[in-house]
Image (cartoon, rainbow, N blue to C red):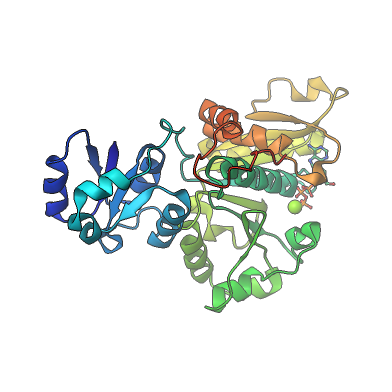
Amino acid sequence: MKVLVAARALEVFEALQRIEDVEYEEALFTGQIYSAIPSCQLIIIDYEDLVEHPYDVRMIRELLAESNVRTYSSEEFLLDPGKCIREAEIRPGSMTRLPEKYTVGFVSYSGGTGKTTLALDTALHFARQTDKHRQASLPVMLIEFTYGDSALASILGLEMPHLYDMATKTDVDPIRFNGVTLIPMDYDNCKLLSIDLIRNYLKRQMANHVLTIVDSYWPHGLIAAVKEDVDRWFVVGTPRLDAIVNARKLKEELGSEAGVVLNMMDSITDNLALAGMERALDLARLDQVDRFEGKLGRQILAHIYGPAWQEFEKRAGKFKWPWRRSGRTGKDD
Ligand SMILES: Nc1ncnc2c1ncn2[C@@H]1O[C@H](COP(=O)(O)OP(=O)(O)OP(=O)(O)O)[C@@H](O)[C@H]1O
Ligand SMILES: [Mg+2]
């Protein structure tokens, strides 16, 4: 039995030392707790003791409420430690690791290269796959930086709050669409706000999400609000000569954290134009990408998380929580 102690009370450690066959680990940072969730059967947690890095306490509270790992406060645990241990669910082996916190941006000088398509497909696929594991998807967010009207709202055909209202009014929250938190931009309003205000709002949102995806025109007047938080830039190009030249230029500008994704590759692509061009990923031109079934997103996620993501997907369909909604098959794409 593995127990995680996310509390400062020394009595908890003393009690655990007196119980046989219990392994325990201490974690006060929210990020440590997140990482430990898959391998623990019991968590003793005093929320007021936590250090909010990099997630906020609300997110951890929600994850734990959905995960069915037994949780007790130190006070509850100390009432009868032996009983708490006995009551903790016996979980079937340890699960794969959860994906790490990450922020990725899709950008390009050229229009129409597929930034929004890739951003949405990646976000929706992440939500679907993590949902198979946990039956409550890990939080993923899509932030749009656009000029003019929101492409996100028009592609999805959804009425939803836009960034200006969310950042300036405390009672306006983003919507969740199929497990993805959406932050569409109304540029004409947002340009009236200070970058700091937008940055502070988006940082608070990022602290509630495991994966944050940015879809941005480049250059964009407000991108400084998230620039320092982006771990990896995907410069999206297509095999058109001008798009290739632009992608190369932008990759150089963004430096070592940037990689080129060549999208909409097909068999007649002029290989000469691509000769010697270093890129992170090639993505084929596919039919019906607007269904967002994850064929593109899967490849992006495998690139971000490496073989761990493939392993995660492979297990996602098979892994069943034995004590929840047993009728569920896990097939949703
Ligand atoms: N891999 C793909 N295969 C087929 N069609 C694609 C692919 N990727 C994108 N598309 C299509 O290309 C068009 C442009 O895509 P998208 O709107 O995502 O580009 P964008 O870079 O966001 O454009 P903008 O610069 O206007 O924001 C859309 O019709 C989209 O469905
Ligand atoms: Mg777009």
Q: Residue at x 58, y 70 (%)?
A: 173
Query: Where does residue 2 sit, x and y in percent of width and height?
Result: 29, 37
Q: In which quadrant will I find the C terminus?
A: top right
Q: Picture quarter containing residue 41?
A: top left
Answer left or right for 96 relative to 250.
left
Indicate the quadrant of ligand 1 in the picture: top right
Q: Residue at x 56, y 30 (%)?
A: 315
Q: Picture quarter containing residue 129?
A: top right
Return the residue nearer the eye: 167 or 44.
44
The relative height of residue 98 versus residue 103 in the rendered view (above or below) is: above
Query: Where does residue 236 sit, x and y in percent of width and height?
Result: 70, 40
Query: Where does residue 147 sit, x and y in percent of width and height?
Result: 73, 63
Does any portion of residue 191 appear in the rendered image? no
Total marks in image: 0
Does any portion of residue 215 appear in the rendered image? yes
Q: Residue at x 58, y 31 (%)?
A: 318
Query: Where does residue 177 sit, x and y in percent of width and height?
Result: 67, 58
Answer left or right for 171 relative to 261.
left
Return the residue nearer the eye: 214 or 180.
180
Q: In which quadrant will I find the N terminus?
A: top left
